[in-house]
Image: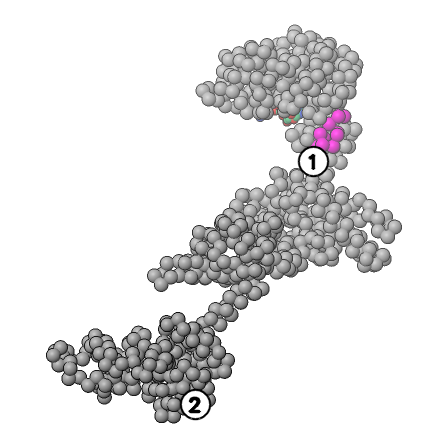
Amino acid sequence: MATELRLQRAEDMHNDSDETAAAPGKAGRLRTRALSGLGSLLPFARPLPPADWGQIDCARVLKVLVRNLDGMVFRCALDAEWTLHFASEGCHALTGYWPEELEGSHAISLERMTHPDDRAPTRQAIMAAVAGGSRYRVEYRLRGKDGSEKWVLERGAGVIDERGERVLEGFIEDVTEQVRGQRQLAETELRYRSIFENSVVGMFQTTADGHYLAANRALAQLYGYETPANLVASLRDIAARLYVDPGRRDEFARLISERGRVIDFESEVYRADGSRIWIAESAHAVHDGAGALLYYEGTVEDISERRQYQARLEHQATHDPLTGLPNRNLLQDRLSQAVALARRSGGRVMVAFVDLDNFKFVNDSLGHAAGDTLLVESARRLRASLRGIDTVARYGGDEFVLILSDHASLNHAVNALERVKQAIAKPVLIDGHELRVDCSIGVSLYPEDGADLDTLLRHADIAMHHAKEQGKGQFQFFTDVLNTAAHERLALESSLRRAIDGGELSVVYQPKVDPYGTPCGFEALVRWESPEFGSVSPVRFIPLAEETGMILPITDFVLRNACREAASWSARGLCAEAGRLNVAVNLSARLFKDPQLPAQIAAVLAESGLPAQRLELEITESLLIGDVEQTVAALEALKALGVRIAIDDFGTGYSSLAYLKRFPVDILKIDRCFVMECERGGEDMAIPRAIISLGHSLRMCIVAEGVENPAQMAVLAAHGCQEFQGYLIARPLTPEGVAAFLQGERR
Ligand code: C2E
Ligand code: CA
Ligand code: CA
């Protein structure tokens, strides 16, 4: 048994060699060959000394060997049936027949057992080899006794037998398992290739450095190439040529190296024609046995439609279908963004609740379609009257919410609301009806009126209802300070209109003196004593007067009074120098370029009898910025009257000192802020000193205003300043005060 087993194993190895199959005809030769072959193949057999070899029963060994072969050793005739002369015992396992049943039988021949379809090709292959004197090797199907079919491999050769006849000797073994395996493999490969090639999903294999190894038709189509080959040839650098954002390829590689795969990796890519689509990739890395990255492979799906659909859904979820404006959801988002930004930058956010006043009427009387038209048109107007960065949202019904942030000042924001009101108030044509719709606006402010959305919205809503109570077309701030300011401004405006005619305005005069204290002139300053507000500073009402156009009558009033007053000083001989005392009148920027102004001044001068050279006109430095030619022309026109021009608050504006020489100016008034601390010398004197020396080089008279103590006057005088004005000398004086001041001087 042990011997047989060993022989069996040895024979397994031997099977691979054709030696066995090509069994020679002569028994002696067969014996020798079998023995020499066996010796080398039996390492575990007890080694025999060469002298003992002759004692081995070669016939027995061969018999055992052949009997134990897994397959059939045979000899057959080259006839139509392949009539078997000899079949080894392996034939039973192979065919189900015993050698005795097969040998010499015509009924159960090799030919009969061969699958009918395989008979002709098998015969052809064998006969060709026999004719050529070569060995053959052929695979075919063999049907055994029980009708079962096996794939067999037959190897053999034509030989001349002992009788000198040509016969076939060979070996047939069962290869059903191998064939089935190969078939399966081939089928699987075919199936996979078919999946790859015919898939409607784009598939690829790419190298780590961004080249395509393979792409299927679906991918080529998706990317707009005629064939996969075109795609592979054209897309040489995936990162740069495929992805709209070149960083995507790195991200793709990073994710795969971290997680081994990517799933639904979304990117925007270029197609062959340059158009863009959105894709989702799912891919993984393929490694070799040593773990080195071979390539990536995966699938690509066109998700452009899904994206568009998502975008549409998102838009629907965040916008009002009627007006296309952001809805409440998006409003919340925008507001929290604006608040977060303002929190960081220390800015403000204005939330305005806008409610159409006549909407219900339109909806009820003209129908919903008309109501919708009105809403759409109102939405358009709101949008048009604000900046792109502001938000206009539909809050519901006829309510809109505006978010205004980043406005330079509250005034700008208020102006924006004013624009909104006016835009809404313009007539709308609906169904042939010309409608006028007003809106009420309630405003809350971050951070004053709330730190979170709900509070800001609630407060704006409260303010809006408050505005409604006040009548249509109003706006109302939630913050009282702002309301007070807004109201006061309104009240001030109407009071000022009455003040001009009602004799509430007066003029006071602040003296200017030379370094020795001798008066050289007065600046006329307007005063307003209001029965409602008490004495109102010009700092408060002059800007209002400028905005409302009331500055014109006010200037006229001051100019007339100042000229009349100054003429009276000399007429009355209030002091020795009275005939040379000047009077200065402040000229607002708004009036300065008015072409009527010179004539108006000439008329006032003529009427009062004041010589033109005794009138000074103070203008602010900001006027010098802008169109130089135009400014020079305006100044020349005034100077032609014979009056002198002073630049007020000099040093606070942005005019270049070098520019100054181009303007026909006589006097520079150093602003109070530079005078305030000039007595400390050093740095604090730097600007006054520069102004004085520049002014002198241009032959201008230098006046220091706001002089409050002798030290200031002394240091400025030492540097060459010629005139001084300020509380040190006197506060602005009434005409009676002026008379007393001048008479005191005389004494
Ligand atoms: P301004 O032309 O620079 O007038 C000087 C202002 O400084 C005056 O204030 C005056 O009372 C004040 N002042 C004078 N000396 C001193 C001082 O030693 N210390 C301090 N702290 N203040 C001093 P006022 O009268 O309130 O006028 C303010 C501004 O209103 C004027 O500044 C001028 O720009 C404008 N204004 C006044 N009257 C008129 C006018 O009739 N027409 C125009 N267009 N503007 C005027
Ligand atoms: Ca002035
Ligand atoms: Ca001034």
Q: Nearer the viewer, residue 165 or 615?
A: 165
Q: From this viewpoint, which residue is outermost toward the bottom?
A: 101
Q: Which residues are magenta?
A: 544-553
Residue 24 shown left or right of residue 479 in the figure: left
Residue 312 place in picture, x, y as percent: 65, 58
Does any atom of ligand 1 lie closer than 8 Å to the CB of label 1? no
The three-letter code of the residue at mark 2 reads His
Q: Is residue 543 above or below residue 433?
A: above
Which secondary structure lies at badge 2?
Answer: loop
Q: Which mark identifies residue 533?
A: 1
Q: Residue at x 67, y 56 (%)?
A: 319
Q: Is residue 174 visible?
A: yes
Q: From this viewpoint, which residue is outermost toward the top?
A: 576
Residue 627: quadrant of the picture = top right
Does any atom of ligand 1 lie closer than 8 Å to the CB of label 2? no
Q: Nearer the viewer, residue 301 or 214?
A: 214
Q: Which mark identifies residue 106?
A: 2
Residue 477 place in picture, x, y as percent: 67, 47
Residue 709 place in picture, x, y as percent: 52, 20
Residue 618: quadrant of the picture = top right
Q: Residue at x 57, y 60 (%)?
A: 218
The three-letter code of the residue at mark 1 reads Phe
Q: Nearer the viewer, residue 217 or 489?
A: 217
Q: Quadrant of the C terminus?
A: top right
- Residue 548 lies within the magenta run: yes
Which secondary structure lies at badge 1?
Answer: loop
Q: Nearer the viewer, residue 42 or 488?
A: 42
Mark 1 or mark 2, whichever is nearer to me: 2
Residue 228 shown left or right of residue 601 in the figure: left
Q: Is residue 614 above or below residue 441?
A: above
CA separation, marks 1 and 2? 139 Å
